[in-house]
Image (cartoon, grey):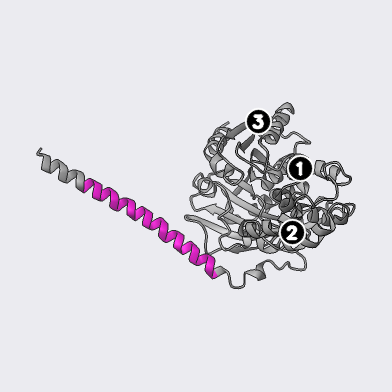
Amino acid sequence: MGTSTRRARRHRFVIAFMAATLAVVGGVVAAEELRIVGDALERPGIDEFYVQPDDAAGGEPGALVKADALLGAPLASRAWRIMYRTTDVHGEPAVATGVLVVPLVPAPPGGRTVVSWGHPTTGAARDCAPSYGFDPFVGIEGLRFLLNRGYAVVATDYVGMGTSGTDSYLVGVTGGNAVLDAVRAARAIVETRASERVVLWGHSQGGQAVLFAAQQAADYAPELNVVAVAAAAPAADLPGLMSAHLDDISGVTIGSYAFTAYADVYPQAPVDGILTPAAREIVPRMNELCLLSNISTLHEIGQPLVGDFTMSDPTTTEPWASLLEQNSAGAEAFDAPLFLAQGLSDELVVPSDTTAFAQHEAELGMDVTYHEIPFADHGTVAYLALPAMLRWLAEVSAR
């Protein structure tokens, strides 16, 4: 065969390969464009979905209040915006919203395993609820990989976001209940073909929520089989988290959400018992702003409060000290294997706190896998942990 012939064949192969690649890329781009168009078409009238019916709090925990099929579903999937019943830390009925995504591939004979996702801090206002966003799926870390593996994925907004209700920011029991009841609501949608098998996966605030969900599942939702729990840089140790940021802008920003939420949830903990007069004046403005889209503004508003935010150390002042301990994870062991990821460049959740938490869980007799990522910070740790987390999940699922 002559050189020119071989070269011509290589060129034809390269051209064919590039054409096929462009076709695939073009198809993905087209699908994404259709999804964005779908998102846009859903915006008019979206507020109506978040209005609770008069009987919204009635029924059993996990009961589905309403569900709307979404036009802008991710590639090769179906999706719904959901509203469902749950229970707060006081045992009172509450309502939460979220999104549910299911791949189009056929479910296995026993039904799909459901991944219940706990999102990181987004804010406290209604508009900060992930399901309310223009793209309600963008913040579900690992969504594409999970759908490709056949999982159904449900993502709660927690109580007090999306729809009316008392804010539950960093209230562990309420957050954990919302994570579990989201699975129950997902199973109520027949098309989901959801089994009782559950994987809990969360980041930061969501890490705290899924850890509480794991602790509570046997008593609160005994029909569910929690097979694995994964958390990236979880807000597991609240006294440690608060101590690390008492005198910086992160402490002011987190505290603006946390102290007001705790004051609403716990009558014994009014904000005037912990926040300075200057903080009480400014915090309402901060609570109107969503974190990711307004981080610069939040820091600008909150910067004057650094060093003048709390009247005393909340980790040593009652009732705040006890409340922070009560809302820290790790009080009880659970049977499911646990994966913890921590970025060593994380300046929010201190790496040594997560290391200590992992050791604590192991000392309780739990099956703990601890994965450190040297260059990951708080914002990137969940994404960068995905390869290791997915390998671990495959191993756990094969047992």
Amino acid on which the number 1 mark rests in the picture:
Leu
| Range of magenta residues | 12-41
Of tags 1 and 3, the one toward the viewer is: 1
Question: 28 or 307, which is in the foreground?
Answer: 307
Give the image location of residue 300, x and y in percent. 67, 58
Amino acid on which the number 2 mark rests in the picture:
Gly
**Residue at image x 47%, y 55%?**
76
Give the image location of residue 81, x and y in percent. 62, 61
Give the image location of residue 386, x and y in percent. 54, 41
**Residue at image x 54%, y 41%?**
384
Amino acid on which the number 3 mark rests in the picture:
Val
- Prevailing secondary structure of the magenta residues: helix
Give whichever of discs 1 and 3 has the lower sequence position. Answer: 1
Q: Residue under circle 1? A: 238
Distance between the alpha carbons at the discs numbered 2 and 3? 32 Å
**Residue at image x 51%, y 44%?**
149
Distance between the alpha carbons at the discs numbered 2 and 1? 20 Å
Distance between the alpha carbons at the discs numbered 1 and 3? 20 Å
Q: Residue under circle 2? A: 160
Give the answer, above or below, for where 43 lies relative to 195.
below
